[in-house]
Image (tube, rainbow, N blue to C red):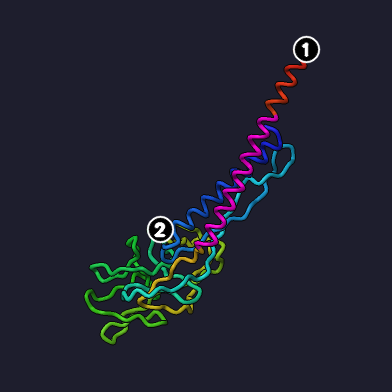
């Protein structure tokens, strides 16, 4: 394949990656705490020194989504920068999805079953069947008595967060966890920060670019075919 064909093919591949990212954003537009992903293009050295768009890196928009009231006491949202901390299988994980539930043991847990961490360490355990109130500072009250405080953390390096799916992030490469002053809002969840309109427009634009590159690749193949036929004709003559 010549330079034109290489460039067109690499461009098609890059736009297929973009479509995957945009489609994933749209699929999670209604997922609580989901953070939209975007990509920026890296130029790799192409054939014969030409640079072609061939690889992409992704970054996550951590801007706060709209807080949606639910009325459920186990639903929590954060107003401000920070994350809830839950106990993952291999260490702490961070999330903005506060759609929690109370286990029979009384512990608060994420939808995946990961225990919500207390600011004192360990999981946050409440008395089963007893109503509780969560103050803006994360302190949980039951029958007028403090039952614990929900851990809300920030990281030193947001770029080090690894997206794990299900609105979870692994902070192992993001530096030390430190306490956040974000306010906890009980009875609400944070909606996705995906703009459906923007994502839809982006998808249409990228699909059109893909189609144009596909046409260019087809045209290039046809030109090469005709060139070979002409060479063969001249050689035969």
Instruction: Please state the horizontal and vertical placement of residue 51, each as a whole percent of the image.
Output: 71, 44
Instruction: Locate residue 85 relative to residue 74 in the image: left or right.
Output: right
Looking at the rendered image, the quarter that the C terminus falls into is: top right
Image quarter for residue 160? Answer: bottom right
The span shown in magenta is 196-223
> Which residue corresponds to the image point at 44% horizontal and 59% vertical from the top-left?
28
Classify 92 as above or below 3.
below
User: Which residue is identified by label 2?
Assistant: 90
> Which residue corresponds to the image point at 70% horizontal and 25% vertical from the top-left?
226
Instruction: Please state the horizontal and vertical placement of residue 4, each as a whole percent of the image.
Output: 70, 37
> Which residue corresponds to the image point at 26% horizontal and 71% vertical from the top-left?
106
Instruction: Locate residue 90 relative to residue 171 in the image: left or right.
Output: left
Instruction: Please state the horizontal and vertical placement of residue 236, each as a whole percent of the image.
Output: 75, 12
The mark nearer the N terminus, 2 or 1, is 2
Q: Does the stretch in magenta take in 201? A: yes
Overall secondary structure of the magenta section: helix
What is the number of the mark on residue 86?
none
What is the number of the mark on residue 237?
1
> Are the residues flagged by discs 2 and 1 in contact, CB closer than 8 Å?
no
Instruction: Please state the horizontal and vertical placement of residue 38, each as a whole percent of the image.
Output: 56, 58
Instruction: Locate residue 233 relative to residue 126 in the image: left or right.
Output: right
Instruction: Locate residue 167 relative to residue 213 in the image: left or right.
Output: left
Task: Tell how many labels.
Answer: 2
């Amino acid at each position: 394949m010549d330079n034109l064909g290489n460039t067109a093919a690499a461009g098609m591949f890059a736009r297929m990656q973009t479509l995957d990212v945009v489609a994933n954003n749209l699929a999670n537009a209604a997922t609580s705490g989901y953070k939209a992903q975007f990509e920026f293009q890296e130029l790799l050295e192409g054939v014969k020194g030409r640079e072609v768009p061939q690889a992409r890196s992704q970054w996550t928009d951590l801007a706060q989504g709209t807080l949606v009231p639910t009325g459920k006491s186990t639903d929590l949202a954060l107003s401000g920068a920070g994350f809830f901390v839950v106990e993952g299988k291999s260490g702490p994980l961070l999330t903005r999805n506060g759609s929690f539930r109370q286990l029979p043991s009384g512990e608060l847990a994420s939808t995946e079953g990961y225990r919500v961490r207390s600011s004192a360490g360990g999981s946050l355990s409440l008395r089963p069947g007893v109503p509780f109130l969560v103050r803006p500072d994360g302190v949980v009250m039951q029958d007028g008595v403090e039952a614990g405080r929900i851990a809300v953390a920030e990281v030193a390096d947001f770029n080090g967060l690894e997206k794990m799916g299900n609105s979870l992030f692994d902070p192992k490469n993001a530096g030390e966890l430190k306490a956040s002053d974000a306010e906890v809002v009980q009875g609400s969840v944070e909606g996705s920060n995906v703009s459906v309109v923007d994502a839809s427009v982006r998808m249409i634009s990228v699909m059109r670019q893909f189609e144009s590159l596909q046409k260019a690749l087809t045209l290039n193949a046809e030109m090469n075919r005709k060139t070979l036929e002409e060479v063969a004709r001249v050689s035969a003559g």
